[in-house]
Image (tube, coloured by chain):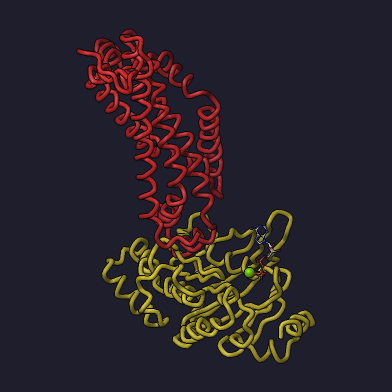
Amino acid sequence: MDEVIRVEGLTKNFGPLQVLRGIDCSVSSSEVVCVIGPSGSGKSTFLRCLNGLEEASGGRVLVHGISVHDNSTDVDALRSEIGMVFQRFNLFPHMTVLDNITLAPTKVRGVPLEKAREQARALLVKVGLLDKIDAYPNQLSGGQQQRVAIARALAMQPAIMLFDEPTSALDPEMVGEVLSVMQTLAEEGMTMMVVSHEMGFARRVANRVLFMDEGVLVEEGTPEEVFDHPREERTRRFLASVL
Amino acid sequence: MEPILWFGWFRADIIAEYGVMFWRGLQMTILVTVICIVQGTALGLAIGLARLADARHSPARQICRYLLRWPSTVYVSFFRGTPLFVQILLIHFAVLPLFINPADGLLISGETARSLKQNYGAFISGILALTLNSGAYISEIFRAGIQSIDRGQIEASRSLGLSFARTMYHVVLPQAFRRMLPPLGNNAIALLKDSSLISAIGLAELAYTARTVAGAYSRYWEPYLSISLMYWTLTLGLAWAVKRLEARYGRGDTR
Ligand SMILES: Nc1ncnc2c1ncn2[C@@H]1O[C@H](COP(=O)(O)OP(=O)(O)OP(=O)(O)O)[C@@H](O)[C@H]1O
Ligand SMILES: [Mg+2]
């Protein structure tokens, strides 16, 4: 299968604090990988290293064979291939929903405005928010904002989507609408890497689950393997604490 | 002209007699203020960005520190740490003759320099001093405005593939600008009032006009009270304009 991301011996230090201690993994096209682990284990840092928001201290991250952290790499071009959805949405508050979505395609890819708008409308239909096209982010609920954020990332037609706890800032009644959009994406064959505490989602949608603790990948496998028959003691303890 | 007395003491005829001069002075004050607001804002943006410049890799990292951050910090410190009045005198009597001098000007010399200095010397020095001074203050406004924008905004923009410059232009500055409007307005008002200091080097703006009139008649209430009212009207107008701008650019703001 086509490999989208390959991580080799990735380490990351914040000063004396070693947050990632040598991570190896790869994600193939159309695969959905869920990353779980206790708070502070380095999940966000890991995800942020994948698109170069965070510098790596050691090791390599290859996206379609191109090294993210090489000085000679055009990191902007690379990032436009990697969609990212944040815990706190991070929509641009001074722009309407439509402008949030069309900004990157028009400015980075040079897509004509009319075409970008057409595509934005299609994406809004997909996330069920066409009626909010002219709203400003502060006029939307958290769940709606997150769905717009997903549409915004999709507008760049990325090869992979990274989600960093996309539902943990949401009120419980809004979690479902965001997860169902993500599930649809997965079913359409989008390559995804999802950091989440939603074990139900991981079980339903993920092809593979990675358990991370103290900066290392402790265990990986299918959802059944990791959730039902964890091999490692640390995995068992973590699952016992969250389920 | 017959003395005209208002309220039994205010010699309105003096103001009427020098009406044209006051009008010219008012125009000069407004001209200087507008030029300095525009130039000071552009300079302030550049200096503010220079103070925030940083990079991950050498040599860009060293360039940012020694060629951008360090000089801009010294610049801001100097212009905020010394009196504007002294800056005006320093620039008019020491710096400008270095560059524009009939004998050996570094920029312009000879006859052009002589006439330029004669006719526009105070204007050039005044604008230069006020621009440099307000640029220092405005850079601090820009810096604080830019730093007040949530990091998540920058990360979202960069993760979409927008370059640093585009992120600044489309995401950070529009949001920062809104928060900067009130302090920028205050700064514009300060600039308008500070322009009166340029009268010390002989620029014929409002304060200079008042001094001239006061000297001619040995009357002080009339000219100084009149220009006070003019300054007051102008600052009220500026404050109103800033309010309007705030209302207009406030859309979508959550904070
Ligand atoms: N910019 C930073 N500077 C210093 N330390 C940091 C920085 N970012 C993260 N850390 C530290 O790195 C460690 C891992 O953080 P990270 O956010 O990756 O954890 P996480 O697994 O995502 O946790 P959570 O589930 O709470 O989101 C934490 O101890 C955190 O304090
Ligand atoms: Mg996290």
Extreme-front residue of the structure: B8
Q: Position of residue A124 (x, y in %)?
A: 38, 78
Query: Which of the chains is yellow?
Result: A
Query: Which of the chains is red?
Result: B
User: What residue is rendered at 47% in x and 51% in y?
Assistant: B179
Residue B107: quadrant of the picture: top left
Of A117 and A138, nearer the camera is: A138
User: What residue is rendered at 25% in x and 18% in y?
Assistant: B4
Extreme-left residue of the structure: B1
Query: In the shown orientation, is residue A113 left or right of residue B94?
Result: left
Of B115 and A187, nearer the camera is: B115
User: What residue is rendered at 29% in x and 27% in y?
Assistant: B26
Picture quarter with the N terminus of chain B: top left
Say if B39 sits above or below B199 in the image: below
Query: In the shown orientation, is residue B9 left or right of residue B16?
Result: right
Q: Is residue A166 visible?
A: yes
Of B130 and B206, nearer the camera is: B206
Residue B197: quadrant of the picture: top left
Q: Can residue B164 be seen in this view?
A: no
The number of callouts visible is 0
Q: Where is residue B11 in the image (x, y as percent from the top left)?
A: 30, 17
* Ligand 2 placement by image quarter: bottom right
Say if A70 sits above or below B145 in the image: below
Query: In the shown orientation, is residue A53 left or right of residue A59?
Result: left
